[in-house]
Amino acid sequence: MTRFLVWAMSLLAPVAAAAHPHVFVEAGLRLIVDGSGRLEAVEVGWTYDELYSLLILEDKGLDADGDGVLNSSEQAALAGFDMNWVADFAGDLFLQKGDAALELGRPVPLSTELGKDGRITTWHRRAVGVPAQDVVVQAYDPTFYTAYDLGGGVEVIGGCVADITPVDLNAAYSALEEILYGMPQAEAEVAFPEVGQKFADTVVLRCGQ
């Protein structure tokens, strides 16, 4: 999250305020490969920024004493708050093998926690079921309303390794500036271009090497 905040302030000052992401999420990935070399599932962690976490707590009337500790009823009220997906929401997780986009299962909630730093972290699981070799994984919001990075880490469970290519933020923001400067500001504010993938780290599974 920090890297997006720093780059956004330094590089996007001249362009429309709408260019800034509004929510910052540290994503974590657990890529689960079975004994036959198939990518069985991806477990996805989202750690929300402090401000968004606070807004969620206030909206739900939780942690009123501000001690950062939820009782059992508050914990139950928070659990699954980000799992009510509309039918066409891809979960900001995109997998590809060759030229084909992979279809993922619906999310299965795993956990929801409020950390001592005031940030909420949730985990959920998505079924996959394809040969793991050369599967490409990216976490991003196409609209760039939410900025993701892989600050939560990438773990492979099974007989493969993850080849991670960090995004070139300089190139990504330069491309965004070029797009925005070519659009009327009013248009950019109403229909912000779908540039989220330009800001995504890329994970590729390598197996049997």
Image: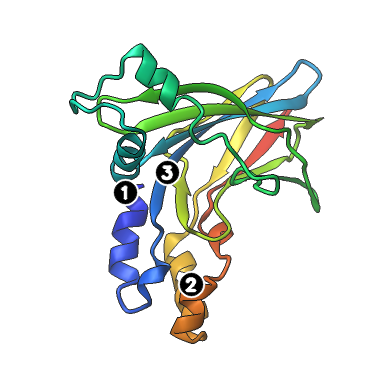
Mark toward the start of the polypeptide (1 vs 3)? 1
In the structure shown, which secondary structural element does the residue marked by tag 2 occupy?
A: helix
Which residue lies under the disc numbered 1? 2
Residue 119, quarter of the rendered image: top left
| Circle 2 Cα neighbour tier, 10 Å, few/some/many (<14 / 14–19 / ≥20) | many
Residue drawn at 74 percent across, 40 percent down:
134
- Relative placement, left or right, of 5 versus 26 is left
Which residue lies under the disc numbered 3? 25
The colour scheme used to paint the residues is rainbow
Which one is in front, 59 or 129? 59
Q: Position of residue 35 (x, y in %)?
A: 77, 15
Quarter of the image with the C terminus is top right
What mark, if any, has residue 176 been given in the picture?
2
Residue drawn at 41 percent across, 35 percent down:
47
What mark, if any, has residue 164 been given in the picture?
none
Q: Position of residue 40 (x, y in %)?
A: 73, 24
In the structure shown, which secondary structural element does the residue marked by tag 1 occupy?
A: helix
Q: Amino acid at mark 3?
A: Val
Residue lying furthest top in this view? Answer: 72
Q: Tell me how far mark 1 sits from mark 2, CA to CA.
A: 19 Å
**Residues at badges 3 and 2 in contact (C-beta under 8 Å)?**
no
Residue 73, quarter of the rendered image: top left
| Circle 3 Cα neighbour tier, 10 Å, few/some/many (<14 / 14–19 / ≥20) | many
Q: Position of residue 145 (x, y in %)?
A: 47, 58
Residue drawn at 55 percent across, 42 percent down:
164
Mark toward the start of the polypeptide (3 vs 2)? 3
Q: Tell me how far mark 3 sits from mark 2, CA to CA.
A: 20 Å
Mark toward the start of the polypeptide (1 vs 2)? 1
Q: Position of residue 54 (x, y in %)?
A: 29, 39
